[in-house]
Image (tube, grey):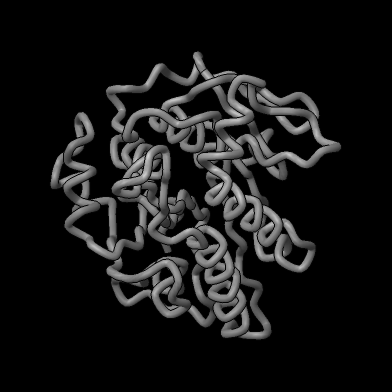
Amino acid sequence: MSTAKTFAFIGATGGCTNSCLAHLLLSDTGYKAIALARTPQKLIDSLLRQPGITESMIADKLTIIKGDATSVIDMKKILVIPQTDGEKSSAPVVVDGIISGVGAVPSLEKGKLFSVKFDNPNITEQSSTTLLMALREIYAERDEQQEVKKPILAVVSTTGITEKDEKRDVPCLFKGGYEYFLAVPHEDKKKMEVIITAEGNKSLFKAIVITKPALLTGDGNLSTAKGLAKIRKGTEENPAVGYFISRADVGEFIWEEVCKKEEPRWFGKKVTLAN
């Protein structure tokens, strides 16, 4: 059986997750990817816009599953590595890692000044719940004599959702705007963090890394990245307070500092990121 790592991607059509997936496709590590997409061609088109990505790379390294992130049946399809060449296993072969950047898509409401609406204000919470349910079903289906390996989980959350007793992780200048314009998606991200870090749920993973970027810029295209060396990193105890960070930089951080590391220093951490 192949020892190359396989990562599952949720919400990979654009942004941080798309950037991370592009790094995997461009790498010479031999890693593979499985992505869930409601519109597979949209994902392919977004990857072909990334510098250096070719159709042959996508065909060789990426399996795209058409489906919805709120469907347990669809979610299970990307969490188990497809068996090829007659390989058989009495236990499900779970992916090595899961990268999720699911989030509500904003748009301006017509006829209303400074009013923003979101396509699905609960999508992050819903997809996280679906992921947990899917993993539980996969583990339950294993042979009782065999232990299924557990994946790492890296999710994209946000700064600006700290509790009153936690250190501030956004500039004071942004605090009002965050609370007004981003209250809905931030509440969704907060619920996601609570769900995946609950004691009964943490045990489903080898480790969890929650990335909490500053206000995101760009569309995740690698040409907009400033590079890993320009990213400031912090934790809950000592947050990296900043105004902006590009989606491409967040994706590179997840690829370099989580996916490629055997025991990342960020395991079990909430990592604030800013340029």
The total of numbered circles placed on residues is: 0
Nearest the camera: 188 or 7?
A: 188
Q: Position of residue 89 (x, y in %)?
A: 48, 78
Name the residue at 53% across, 75% down: 134
Nearest the camera: 88 or 174?
A: 174
Nearest the camera: 212 or 90?
A: 212
In the rendered image of this protein, does residue 10 appear above or below residue 223?
Answer: below
Name the residue at 76% across, 24% down: 238
In the rendered image of this protein, does residue 13 appear above or below residue 83?
Answer: above
Name the residue at 58% across, 46% down: 183
In the rendered image of this protein, does residue 130 appear above or below residue 100?
Answer: below
**In the picture, residue 240 is in which quadrant?**
top right
Q: Position of residue 197 (x, y in %)?
A: 72, 56
The residue furthest left is 55
Q: Could you tell me if residue 29 is visible in this image?
A: no
Nearest the camera: 89 or 22?
A: 22
Q: Could you tell me if residue 184 is visible in this image?
A: yes
Q: Along the horizontal axis of the image, is 5 left or right of 38?
A: right
Q: Position of residue 100 (x, y in %)?
A: 48, 52
Quadrant of image for the N terminus: bottom left
Name the residue at 46% across, 49% down: 101
Q: Position of residue 94 (x, y in %)?
A: 51, 66
